[in-house]
Image: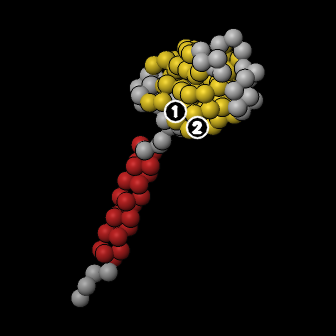
Amino acid sequence: MMDRARPASSLRSVAFGLSVAASIWTAGCHSYHVDATVENRTGAPVKLLEVDYPSASFGADKLAVDGVFHYRIQLRGSGGLKVQYTTPDERQVEINGPVLAERQEGQLEIVLLPAGKAEFHPQLGNGPDGTH
């Protein structure tokens, strides 16, 4: 005669173990992202736009006057942000931005201004709940 209580108990134990493992796995695998936006308020189109951040970069061939470019990044390591672009008169502009760190997430607005200047508006937190 087979004892039916034992297999049901074993199944509950296995299900519980899988549930705990899944919870640990999903908690440990949170992917931290920063939604970056670059706005061109220079008064002229820019070309060869590049945004360098720790361990990677993104950019666009051109960004029209009042154009907006969105990109989602994932930070690996920490370091300074740098924006580079070329003006219509072929002048290279380089602007240093804020220091970013791995595990930060949230939003980062970069506003390109006339005369090779920029404003940086980071709204970044350090965790899955977005707290600072």
In the rendering, which numbered label is found on residue 87? none
Q: Is residue 109 visible?
A: no
Which quadrant of the structure image shows residue 66? top right
Q: Nearer the viewer, mark 1 or mark 2?
A: 1
Which residue lies at the image location 52% right of the left edge and 33% below the top edge?
58
- Viewport quadrant of the C terminus: top right
Badge 2 amino acid: Tyr
Mark 1 closeness class: few <14, some 14–19, many ≥20 residues within 10 Å: some
Foreground residue among 64 and 70 = 64
At x 45%, y 19%, the residue is 79
Image point (35%, 58%), residue name: 17
Q: Is residue 86 left or right of residue 41?
A: left
Q: Quadrant of the N terminus?
A: bottom left
Q: Determine the residue positioned at 49% across, 35% down.
A: 74
Along the viewing direction, whichever of 39 and 12 lies nearer the viewer: 39
Query: Badge 2: how crowded within 10 Å, few (<14), some, or many (20+)?
Result: few
Quadrant position of residue 29? top left
Label 1 with label 2: CB-CB less than 8 Å: yes
In the rendered image of this protein, does residue 131 appear above or below residue 115?
below
Viewer-nearest residue: 12 or 123: 123
Query: Tag 2 or tag 1, which sits nearer the N-term?
Result: 1
Identify the residue under disc 1.
58
Residue furthest toward the top? Answer: 115
Q: Position of residue 108 (x, y in %)?
A: 62, 28
* Residue 12 visible, this angle: yes
- In the picture of the structure, the residue carrying the numbered disc 2 is 71
Q: Position of residue 127 (x, y in %)?
A: 52, 33
**Left or right of 65: which side holds 89?**
left
Describe the element under mark 2 as helix, strand or loop. Answer: strand
